Amino acid sequence: MNRMYLFLLVVVMTSQIALAQQYKTVQQMSATFQIKNAGLNVDGKFSNVKVDAMIDEKNITKSTLSGIIKANSVSTGNAKRDDHIKNKAEFFDVAKYPNIEMKAVKISPTKFKDSYKIDWLITMKGISKKVSTDVLIAPQGGSVLLLAVFKLNRLDWKLGSKSATMSDEVMITLNCTLTK
């Protein structure tokens, strides 16, 4: 599998139901991204991702997912660039908008095993947009793997402006392992 990256997002799950087949303890979570800038791929990650989780293995469509990424935890391996995208009003403006939020509003099965279509509400910089993604939700022994790889248009959330050198599309990868 090619290297895929994430730019935002999170998977948190909450539920009132206490079934034996629920997964809600986060063992591992990563949120990475990749964007093309000046012809080169820029890889980044968020180190502060809050994930609470609940997956109902018997009926995944009843699961709930949401999460919060602290925007100031972005890292691209270049301190000057990181400072720019964290603090400038044209990008994350973390003083005014500290969180990136993602919440599943609908989970539907697809025709492929362990694959689900999730409709998300993603909020960045005070702008909320609905986004649909395919998500792998695969039980693996005593855990469940959640993997989402998708593209977002950064301009939809007013992250920067139209640019001849920077791609509008950002490849996002969310990877989470849950246990009971």
Image (cartoon, rainbow, N blue to C red):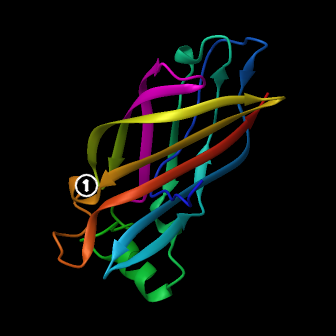
The front one of 136 and 68 is 136
Q: Residue at x 44, y 27 (%)?
A: 117
Residue 124 image offset from top left, x and y in percent: 33, 52
Q: Does residue 107 belong to the magenta stretch?
A: yes
Q: Amino acid at mark 1?
A: Trp
Q: Secondary structure at mark 1?
A: helix
Disc 1 packing (10 Å; few <14; some 14–19; many ≥20): some
Residue 170 image offset from top left, x and y in percent: 36, 60
Residue 140 image offset from top left, x and y in percent: 77, 31
The front one of 154 and 98 is 154
Which quadrant: the C terminus? Answer: top right
Instruction: Name which quarter of the figure residue 18 lies in.
Output: top right
Instruction: Name which quarter of the figure residue 176 lies in.
Output: top right
Indicate whether 43 appears above or below 58.
below
Q: Residue at x 50, y 69 (%)?
A: 44
Q: Residue at x 65, y 11 (%)?
A: 17
Q: Main secondary structure of the magenta part?
A: strand
The front one of 78 and 50 is 78
Residue 43 image offset from top left, x and y in percent: 49, 71
Range shown magenta? 97-120
- Please give left or right for residue 62 compared with residue 80 in the image: right
Q: Does residue 37 belong to the magenta stretch?
A: no
Q: Residue at x 27, y 74 (%)?
A: 166
The residue that disc 1 covers is 157
Instruction: Name which quarter of the figure residue 132 lies in.
Output: top left
Indicate whether 41 appears above or below 126.
below
Indicate whether 28 appears above or below 55.
below
